[in-house]
Image (cartoon, rainbow, N blue to C red):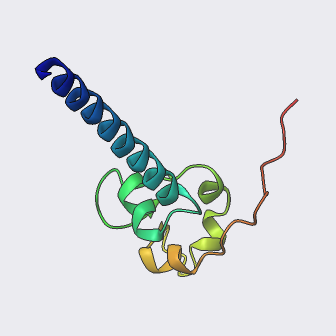
Amino acid sequence: MKKTILGLSLLFALIASTAIQAQDQQSNRKERKGPPTASKLLKKMDTNEDGKLSKTEVKGSLKKDFAAIDTDKDGFLSEAELEKMPAPQKGERPPRRE
């Protein structure tokens, strides 16, 4: 009887931990949908932590479109400029290299 109760307790604990892990993974996937916010971009790319992004700190489409996003032409992207930049179009990808 004790072995049965212990076995069922362990089984329940295993099922509960698996369900919790699945929930965590699902919530992480929801957070990753869509383009990152301006504050997330700053947090991720601002290596010198000065609150703005220089051309050497950015990569990808931010680097390519840097001049257009830098509306005050000071050589840096502020959080306000990042918030105003157009969102990437769904399905938009860079051309393939052959």
Frontmost residue, 36 versus 98 = 36
Q: Return the x and y of residue 22 as percentages of the image width and height.
A: 43, 43
Q: Classify the position of the N terminus by image quarter.
A: top left
Residue at figure coordinates x 35%, y 59% from the top left: 43
Farthest-out residue, top: 3
Quick check: 23 above or below 6?
Answer: below
Farthest-out residue, right: 98
Residue at figure coordinates x 51%, y 58% from the top left: 30
Q: Return the x and y of residue 37 as percentages of the image width and height.
A: 48, 68
Residue 57 visible from this viewpoint: no
Using the rendered view, name the quadrant where residue 3 is placed. Answer: top left
Q: Return the x and y of residue 58 as percentages of the image width and height.
A: 51, 53
Q: Classify the position of the C terminus by image quarter.
A: top right
Give the number of marks: 0
Residue 27 visible from this viewpoint: yes
Frontmost residue, 87 versus 82 = 87
Frontmost residue, 80 versus 75 = 80
Using the rendered view, name the quadrant where residue 7 is placed. Answer: top left
Farthest-out residue, left: 2
Residue at figure coordinates x 11%, y 22% from the top left: 2
Looking at the image, residue 12 sits to the left or right of residue 41; the answer is left
Residue at figure coordinates x 57%, y 81% from the top left: 84
Looking at the image, residue 67 sits to the left or right of residue 92; the answer is left
Using the rendered view, name the quadrant where residue 67 is placed. Answer: bottom right
Quick check: 56 above or below 16?
Answer: below
